[in-house]
């Protein structure tokens, strides 16, 4: 089982999205289920489009919780790093 390390940026993003009113409890349940699957090193359903990132973000991966709601994360042998959460524009503008 992987240990979870939550980056400060992820905490801010989750709080912002929770307070935005654009996402529902069921969306956050899906997010929690995905995080739990990663933590338990289970396979992730292909519908979430897990993929590696390029450029300044090349050490990270992305997964689509919803069509335009992404989780940016990193996995190594011991840890799951939760890095960012948000829309494409929110996530990628931080790395320009």
Image (cartoon, rainbow, N blue to C red):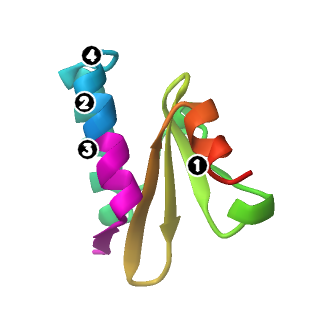
Q: Earlier in the sequence, mark 3 or mark 2?
A: 2
Disc 4 crowd rating (10 Å Cα; few below 14, some 14-19, many 20+) is few
Between the C-alphas of marks 1 and 3, the distance is 15 Å
Q: Which residues are magenta?
A: 1-14
Instruction: Name the residue: 46% across, 51% down.
Output: 84
Disc 2 crowd rating (10 Å Cα; few below 14, some 14-19, many 20+) is some
In the picture, residue 88 is in which quadrant?
Answer: top right
Between the C-alphas of marks 4 and 2, the distance is 7 Å
Between the C-alphas of marks 3 and 4, the distance is 18 Å
Residue under pointer 1: 62
Q: Is residue 55 above or below residue 87?
A: below
**Front label number (3 vs 2):** 2
Where residue 32 appears, as percent x and y from the top left, is: 25, 44
Instruction: Name the residue: 55% across, 24% down.
Output: 68
Residue under pointer 2: 18
Q: Secondary structure at mark 1?
A: strand
Residue under pointer 3: 32
Q: Is residue 13 magenta-colored?
A: yes
Instruction: Name the residue: 31% across, 20% down.
Output: 23
């Amino acid at each position: 089982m992987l240990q979870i390390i939550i980056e400060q940026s992820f905490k801010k993003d989750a709080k912002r999205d929770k307070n935005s009113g654009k996402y529902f409890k069921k969306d956050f349940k899906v997010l929690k289920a995905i995080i739990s699957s990663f933590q338990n090193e289970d396979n992730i359903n292909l519908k979430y489009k897990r993929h590696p990132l390029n450029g300044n973000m090349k050490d990270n991966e992305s997964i689509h919780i919803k069509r335009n709601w992404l989780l940016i994360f990193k996995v190594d042998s011991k840890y799951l790093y939760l890095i960012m959460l948000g829309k494409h524009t929110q996530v990628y503008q931080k790395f320009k």
